[in-house]
Image: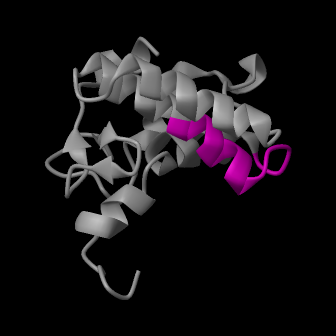
């Protein structure tokens, strides 16, 4: 974090899963822990990267399997899947710019674009 205070490069990769994860956490805490919410966010953000043509479908499956192997959730429990509330929480994320939701987009496992990318909210809603 100290090496990348502006959240580009390495820090952007560390933010993977946090845009969606923090929104879920805002609705599910304290029943779901921060790491559990970020685990779910990682899988959904990997799906976004795949849908944007940036991440291989096999990588999405691998990410999901690894989290499951560690006993972490990979899907949002239905009782917290309140889309308008989740979108409202994502709209408040500090990485957003110019009124656009920005998400860390993976290119491959362990590699992302240097800065969070704007993502059409319609694409997020389809998750």
Instruction: Give the image location of residue 25, x and y in percent.
Output: 66, 46
- Residue 78's place in the image compared with 73, above or below, is above
> In the current view of this chain or complex, which residue is farthest to the top?
126
Residue at 24 percent across and 75 percent down: it is: 6
Q: Is residue 4 above or below residue 62?
A: below
Does 37 appear in magenta?
Answer: yes
Locate residue 85, reporting x and y percent.
55, 30
- Identify the residue shown where x is 19% and y is 58%: 114
Residue at image location 36% in from the left, 25% down from the top: 48
- The quarter holding residue 63 reads top right
Direction from residue 88 to residue 4 in the image, left or right: left
Q: Position of residue 113 (x, y in %)?
A: 21, 49
Closest to the observer, 39 or 121: 39
Residue 72 shows in the view: no
Q: Is residue 8 above or below residue 16?
A: below
Query: The N terminus lies in which quarter of the figure?
Result: bottom left
Q: Is residue 20 left or right of residue 7?
A: right
Image location (x, y in percent) of residue 73: 74, 33
Q: Is residue 38 visible?
A: yes
Q: Point out the stretch of residues depicted in magenta.
A: 29-42
Residue at image location 50% in from the left, 28% down from the top: 44
């Amino acid at each position: 974090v100290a090496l990348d205070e502006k959240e580009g490069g390495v820090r952007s990769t560390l933010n993977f899963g946090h845009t969606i994860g923090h929104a879920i956490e805002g609705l599910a805490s304290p029943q779901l822990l921060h790491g559990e919410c970020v685990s779910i966010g990682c899988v959904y953000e990997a799906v976004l990267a795949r849908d944007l043509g940036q991440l291989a479908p096999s990588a999405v499956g691998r990410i999901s399997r690894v989290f499951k192997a560690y006993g972490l959730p990979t899907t949002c429990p239905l009782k917290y899947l309140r889309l308008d509330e989740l979108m409202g929480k994502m709209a408040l994320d500090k990485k957003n710019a110019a009124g656009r939701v920005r998400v860390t987009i993976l290119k491959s496992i362990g590699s992302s674009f240097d800065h969070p990318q704007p993502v059409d909210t319609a694409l997020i809603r389809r998750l």
